[in-house]
Amino acid sequence: MRLENVHHLFDSRGIAGLHGIDLKVKSGELFAVLGPNGAGKTTLLKVLRGEFRPQSGKVTEADRCAWLDSSTVIPPEANIQTWLVEQVRRGVDAEKKSQLARDMAESLEFTFQLKLKARELSDGLLQRVKIAGALIDHPDLLLLDEPFSHLDTPTRESVLSVLKPYLQQREIACVWVTHQREDALTFADRIGLMYFGKWEQVGTPEELYFHPRTLFSAKFMGHENLVTVSRPTPNVLWQTPFGGWDSQGIGFGKTHVVMCIPPTAFTIDPQGSFAGQVVRISFKGAHTHVTVKLHDAEWVLEWTQGPFKHASEVRFNAHLRGAIGIDCL
């Protein structure tokens, strides 16, 4: 499946739609599409599905394509095995259809629920059945338009942990639109970040997180503590609010870049070199984010040593080795 320089516009101003999209997804690859509302994610899926014919560009479609979104409904009184058999479109006999249903149930781990009715299944198991219905004809390409958005985090992770190896083993390409950044980072082989109908950045989860190419990419991937830093001449350390910083090649030959300091790069220490006024405290469970004001800016610090004792001021150290440079200026 491949897209080359695809344009698909819905109005004369070109505000919505797709603008010069290239995409190639390999067999067995799980490609996640992230982006804000209106970025063009669902439009992309509809072009891949053949529902939209783009105004320009080349689309090489998959031979067999399956689609699953949040609108798929299994009647509450439907028997699971019967419903699955009904999803088989290929010209095979009844026994073969029943075998396909049993095979899918075994692969997606709901064999013991085949004889139950839909209303008797948990949301997670019901979602596995819906996925099985989409995959039962062994498509070359699976398109997912936020089908897991209504599931809680543990249930989503359970469904995805079963789905991903199934796609890999059977070499089924998958394009998955999601708003769940953490899910994409955990389960996707590659991520495409869309913004106003264009790719803002495409790469592995590690590439998007540790090497964002733009401010938008950095913010969307959850980075905080963004600051523009400078140096008088190239090939010297960057001057930052917390001392000199070696960007390790980012911004070669430049005198300005954007620096991102992860909250984990700060350690709260009564003997720390810096002091900040506490602005707010955000308890996250395993850790706490402490926002402090220093140098006319706010900085998010991470505390992992149990409950944080409220204070009006904290002292801390900054370890800039873990900072990330964004060469976007």
Image (cartoon, rainbow, N blue to C red):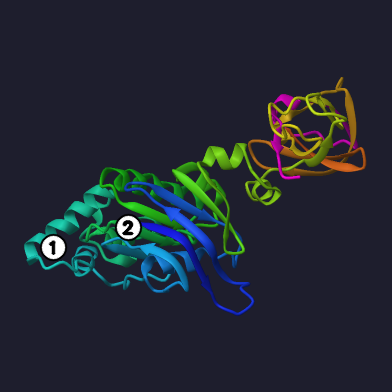
To which quarter of the image does residue 301 belong? top right
Q: Looking at the image, which residue is at 8% across and 66% down?
A: 94
Task: Tell whether 286 sits left or right of 155.
Answer: right
Q: Looking at the image, which residue is at 71% across and 24% down?
A: 321
Task: Give coordinates of residue 116: x percent, y percent.
Answer: 24, 62
Secondary structure under the numbered disc 1 in the rendered image: helix
Task: Give coordinates of residue 14: x percent, y percent.
Answer: 61, 73
108 up-or-down from 266: above or below: below
**Tag 2: amino acid:** Leu
Rate crowding at label 2 as few (under 14), some (14 to 19) or many (20 or more) other CA atoms within 10 Å.
many
To which quarter of the image does residue 290 belong? top right
Queried whether the magenta region covers residue 65, the answer comes back as no
Task: Give coordinates of residue 236: x percent, y percent.
Answer: 81, 24
Write the start and end of the magenta stretch as one range. 303-329
- The residue wearing badge 1 is 97
- The residue wearing badge 2 is 141
Secondary structure under the numbered disc 2 in the rendered image: strand
